[in-house]
Image (cartoon, rainbow, N blue to C red):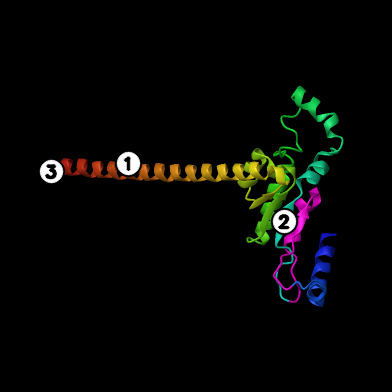
């Protein structure tokens, strides 16, 4: 299905359909939503599709539809979930509502696997999330960890998403700065130890 849609876009582009009927002359990208487990498992094949005329990639981005991906992975209807998930949370069966916070062990693993497969074929591929998870701070932290570039969410969750993304960036920079400082300190201590050993050897030789 995905390949058929991409081929349709390519044919329309080659025929001049967009330019003729929509005056579309600006550059654009073609990508696909990853919303079912099978698409996540064969993401390398999807990413490897190329235009036979110029050899350029036909799929330049993945957008993970985590709402549907969660439904299909966990076998849970989002429309009916309010009838039993609150009880599951009370009983400790679930720690978080999987439609609010990404299920890292299941759905998250699929996203991570898909991202790795896509990047292995096309390192410049853009990766994003489209769904309620895009506005959840805990989920945003996970998406950043597995290498996604940005998130998309409903308008009222944009402030929360931007704040979460900013906090993650600050934490990442602080962690890198701390690591550089520790490495620098370790290097200085190593040099001091080496110099001390050299001085000790000199004293032994003189004696």
Q: Is residue 188 left or right of residue 43?
A: left
Q: Earlier in the sequence, mark 1 or mark 2?
A: 2
Can residue 142 be seen here? no
- Residue at far top of view: 91
Q: Residue 205 in the image: state x and y as whole percent.
A: 16, 44
Of tags 3 and 2, the one toward the viewer is 2
25 vs 72, left or right, is left
Give the numbered dot on residue 206.
3
Nearest to viewer (mark 1 / mark 3): 1
Tell me the quarter of the image containing the C terminus: top left
Q: Going 71% across and 46% down the picture, which residue do you hit?
A: 155
Tell me the residue at 80%/51% (across/down).
Answer: 38
Magenta-colored span = 25-53
Q: Residues within 10 Å of mark 3 (few under 14, many from 20)?
A: few
Task: Examine the rendered structure and indicate whether residue 207 appears above or below residue 63.
Answer: above
Kindly identify which residue carries mark 1.
189
Percent position of residue 159, x then y: 64, 43
x and y percentages locating residue 48 in the rendered image: 73, 63
Q: CA distance from mark 1 to mark 3?
A: 26 Å
Using the rendered view, name the quadrant where residue 24 is placed.
bottom right
Q: CA distance from mark 3 to mark 2?
A: 70 Å
For the image, the number of numbered tags is: 3
Q: Position of residue 153 (x, y in %)?
A: 71, 47
Numbered mark located on residue 62 in the image: 2
């Amino acid at each position: 299905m995905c390949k058929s849609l991409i081929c349709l876009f390519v044919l329309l582009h080659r025929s001049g359909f967009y330019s003729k009927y929509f005056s579309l002359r600006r550059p654009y990208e073609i990508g696909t939503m990853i919303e079912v487990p099978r698409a996540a498992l064969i993401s390398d094949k999807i990413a490897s599709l190329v235009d036979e005329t110029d050899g350029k990639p036909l799929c330049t981005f993945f957008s993970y539809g985590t709402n549907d991906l969660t439904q299909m992975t966990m076998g849970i209807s989002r429309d009916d979930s309010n009838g039993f998930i609150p009880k599951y949370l009370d009983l400790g069966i679930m720690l978080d509502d999987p439609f609010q916070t990404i299920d890292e062990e299941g759905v998250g693993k699929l996203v991570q696997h898909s991202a790795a497969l896509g990047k292995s074929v096309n390192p410049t591929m853009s990766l994003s999330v489209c769904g309620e998870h895009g506005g959840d701070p805990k989920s945003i932290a996970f998406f950043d960890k597995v290498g996604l570039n940005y998130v998309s969410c409903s308008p009222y969750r944009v402030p929360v998403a931007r704040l979460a993304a900013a906090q993650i960036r600050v934490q990442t920079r602080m962690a890198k700065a701390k690591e550089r400082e520790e490495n620098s300190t370790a290097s200085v201590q190593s040099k001091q130890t080496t110099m001390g050993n050299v001085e000790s050897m000199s004293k032994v030789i003189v004696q």
